Image: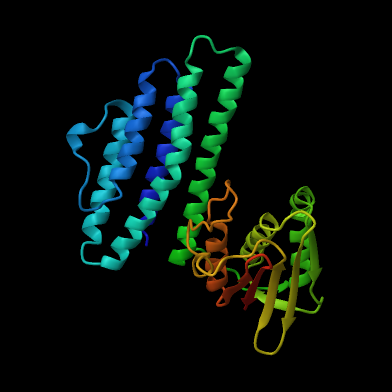
Amino acid sequence: MRYVWPVLAAVFGIAFFATLAVTLIRARRRKNLIRELTDYITKVQDFDTLPDMGKISEGDFGILQSEIYKVVTILREEYSSERGQKKYMSDMMSDISHQFKTPLTAISIVTELLMAPEVSEAQRLDYASKIESQTDRMTWLIRNLLTLSQLEAGVLEMKNEEIVLKKLMDEIAVSLEVMAEAADVSLEIKIPGEIVIKGDKRWFGEALTNIIKNGIEHTPAGGHVSVSATQNNIVSCIKIADDGKGISPEHLPHIFERFYKAGNDSPNSVGIGLAMAKQIINNHGGRIEAESNEGRGTCFILKV
């Protein structure tokens, strides 16, 4: 798993050089470089057929492509006898390249528009804002991919502290208040004050936040999201339920998979929040499952 980091670092470099190419708008050639880079990312998904080194670009993009080539070559050699690890790395590269195609394409299109001589100053500012938005999206994606990969590898240290669940949930509710109000969704907390669990407050709060956000996003205006909890001598059970759209039976088994998007997902959804939540709960020695009926809402059940 430790070889995930060089790959993610290389991809972070992709975002940096893509942004650099856009900001240095002096020639139309930058659009072709972005297209070449997008094609290159796609090709390095295949560990058995690497791109021809003779076709690598010159300049900074060429250096970046060369470094990616070296990293993938090392990974291929290291995992030649470990098929499971090799598949993991291949899937990760596939996920990354797929998620990067959309923002890179958007940057390429807007860059071409930005270079047009008849573009007004107001339009230029608008195009620059769109480019900034897409680069921010890539940066956010890289950070979350890195975090998820660290969680999957078990290299993130989890504290073992006492967490007063109601207090944690009250803090989360405050942080999501604006989001819930904007969606016209009420957030109800029904947690006894005496429930205390063991874990890392920051990361456990991250998991709960991701699940509640998911509920708010998939609940229509006027709906409700509720959080309740019970505890006995063996386990603490937390239920996060909404009366939203629900999840169809064919999608339900896959909702915790990285980048999986069900048919009713928001267009802006990346599909990483629930995967991260599940991994955090797993790292706390717990488990999470979901029950849902289309048109009648979804209930996430956490046991820790």
Horizontal relation, residue 244 to residue 25: left or right? right
The residue lying furthest to the front in this view is: 295
Q: In the rendered view, tell whether residue 55 sits above or below residue 100.
A: above
Residue in view at x 53 percent, y 29 percent: 131
Position of 41 with respect to 243 (left or right) is left
How far from the left and from the top, in percent, is residue 243?
A: 72, 65
Q: Nearer the viewer, residue 133 or 64?
A: 133
Residue 166 in picture, x, y percent from top left: 78, 70
Instruction: Using the image as rendered, state which of residue 210 and residue 271 is in the foreground.
Output: 271
Q: Residue at x 36, y 37 (%)?
A: 38
Answer left or right for 19 relative to 298: left
Q: Quadrant of the N terminus?
A: bottom left
**237 shown above or below 41:** below
- Considering only vertical position in the picture, is 111 above or below 188? above
Residue for point 32% across, 32% down:
36
Residue 155 shows in this picture: no
Rendering colour mode: rainbow
The C terminus lies in which quarter of the figure? bottom right
Q: Is residue 219 left or right of residue 119?
A: right
Spot the residue most to the bottom.
233
Number of marks drawn = 0
Viewer can see residue 250? yes
Position of residue 123 relative to residue 257, above or below, is above
Q: In x, y percent, where is residue 129?
A: 59, 27
Q: Nearer the viewer, residue 66 or 189?
A: 189
